């Protein structure tokens, strides 16, 4: 992708280089339904995992992380332990729900690894079942089953939530059901570029459709073909942007980039939670793409992760 | 301008109607230097004033505002008085610097009128000299001269700043000089879609170039032709985004829309102030244009003005 001088002047050199290495996807809108068809997902997933593996292993080895595979309520969970747990975090854990459009990714992706390493805290990352094999709301219900156990194992005020993109849909929907069940709420949470609205609403889905890392048409076709619901796509559990919240909902910090397809969703979710009286902070970063947060070395990502940690430590204190 | 169904779904009906009434400007990039040439500014300004006048008069009469024309340090100032001053605001005033690309607008524009009416506070609005007749830094120095007097007339903690677009460049540059002069700082301020960077940097100048109310090429040509500086356009007083700030700078609330040409500048200024330890809040609104804040009846504008007032009352308490 090419950037103008004015666009380059407002982002870091590292981010500008990152963009310039990205290829434009030709015929994206035309190809989207084929590329993301259910039958192609297994090979898509394998290719994605192969690209991620060396990045994950580098983070694990650099930060000396220990990974343990356990089950909670019969759901696989990866527990990521940093070599040194910060004393204020000794009793705390992060509950992580990874992203990947409901079809890709794993519990040991960069998100939990970097958070464990940089915050000095144990991360419980849920290996929920992916789509299209698992249909909505299987993954969400798995997350809820894990949460039910976690609030028994840990003081709820010691649980910090974190989720990315599609993982945020699972997290928000799960928390709404947990509230209905009168389960105690977690201390606070981090919603990284939340896919809180699967209905296709939002200005940035149009404005950033070919400016983000992945063409919007891929994202939309991936969800529509692999993670459909039989209900209205604005159902508050399928698209939790449309749910009703109240001030008992956990304090939340939301991150998005201005080049992000989900910029609009992040902004709308901020106002939704704020208007409901939830403590919420929105961190918008200039010129950044969907999920830039998890680049270990990009200055904008380092800065936003520090700001997120500051929020979480404030509310989980 | 036309909107997709997804774009319409994420904004209010009123805002969607507003957009659909706006014409697209054909050949904007080509026409920009002609339309905004110094010789055309007087008629441009007169046309703009004629459009604004009935809107301003409607606000004045609806809210029963009283306008007094005074001078402070020989600079004309419009004092806008609401019929009822809220008791907590009895000793407080707002200092307003209007926008208009340095070439248009007046001290009695909607910004000060609405703020006086909705907050129940007296507004001192500076009638600074416009460009191209006045060159940089004439207007900024006029604002500084007024500020020097105001901090004698009022307790600095009772002065609340407010500025819009190009007015924010004047405000920020003025406050930086005031700090250097060891003048006391105001209690807090509202920076509405700040033109804090006149160098042409920023992703949104490209991404929103034909999506905002006015084509970006008009804005850039207007400034370049009528408000040039003989110095580097990244000079910290000409483009205060590049200035150094410290925690003694007034707490600031910044507003922008995602369709705003100055979205990037707002976002960058937020991080600049935050990293310097300044108390700062960024309010981003979905799908909104440059200066949408001042539409009296658009729900998104009503909401953001309420959030701004909440911030100002917090910090001017």
Image (cartoon, coloured by chain):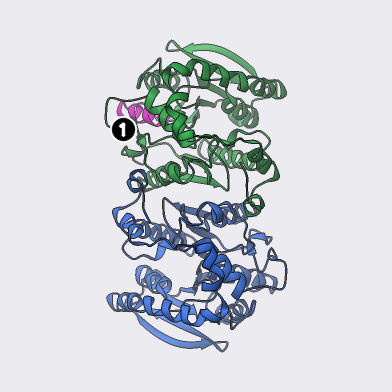
Chain colours: A blue, B green
Image coords of residue B65 (percent x, y):
66, 20
Q: Left or right? Give the position of A180 relative to A139.
A: right
Which residues lie in the magenta part? B169-183
Residue occupying image coordinates x 40% and y 14%: B133
Question: Does residue B160 lie above or below A89 as drawn?
Answer: above
Whether residue B170 appears in this view of the structure is no
Q: Which residue is mark 1?
A: B233
Q: Left or right? Give the position of A137 relative to B33.
A: right
**How many labels sit on residues?**
1
User: Which quadrant, please, contains the N terminus of chain B?
Assistant: top right
Image coords of residue B147 (percent x, y):
42, 22
Residue occupying image coordinates x 30% and y 35%: B234
Image coords of residue A218 (percent x, y):
52, 66
Q: Is residue B208 magenta?
A: no
Question: Does residue A119 lie above or below B258 as drawn?
Answer: below
Question: Does residue B167 lie above or below A82 as drawn?
Answer: above
Q: Left or right? Give the position of B200 relative to B82.
A: left
């Amino acid at each position: 992708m090419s950037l103008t001088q004015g666009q380059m002047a407002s982002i870091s050199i590292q981010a500008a280089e990152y963009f310039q290495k990205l290829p434009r996807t030709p015929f994206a809108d035309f190809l989207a339904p084929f590329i993301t068809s259910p039958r192609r997902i297994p090979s898509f997933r394998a290719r994605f995992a192969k690209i991620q593996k060396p990045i994950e292993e580098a983070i694990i080895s650099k930060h000396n992380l220990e990974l343990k595979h356990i089950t909670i309520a019969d759901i696989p969970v990866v527990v990521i332990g940093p070599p040194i747990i910060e004393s204020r975090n000794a009793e705390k854990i992060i509950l992580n729900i990874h992203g990947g459009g409901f079809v890709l990714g794993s519990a040991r992706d960069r998100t939990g690894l970097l958070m464990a390493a940089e915050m000095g805290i144990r991360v419980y990352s849920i290996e929920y079942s992916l789509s299209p094999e698992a249909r909505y709301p299987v993954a969400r219900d798995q997350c809820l089953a894990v949460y039910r156990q976690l609030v028994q194992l840990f003081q709820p005020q010691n649980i910090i939530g974190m989720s990315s993109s599609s993982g945020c849909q699972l997290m928000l929907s799960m928390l709404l059901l947990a509230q209905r069940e009168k389960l105690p709420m977690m201390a606070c949470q981090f919603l990284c570029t939340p896919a809180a609205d699967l209905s296709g609403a939002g200005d940035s889905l149009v404005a950033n459709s070919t400016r983000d890392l992945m063409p919007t048409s891929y994202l939309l076709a991936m969800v529509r073909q692999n993670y459909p619901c039989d209900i209205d796509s604005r159902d508050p559990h399928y698209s939790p942007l449309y749910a009703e919240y109240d001030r008992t909902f956990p304090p939340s910090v939301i991150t998005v980039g201005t080049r992000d397809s989900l910029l609009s969703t992040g902004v709308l979710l901020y106002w939704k939670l704020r208007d409901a009286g939830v403590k919420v902070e929105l961190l918008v970063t200039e010129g950044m793409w969907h999920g830039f947060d998890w680049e270990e070395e990009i200055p904008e990502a380092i800065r936003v992760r520090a700001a997120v940690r500051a929020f979480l430590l404030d509310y989980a204190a």
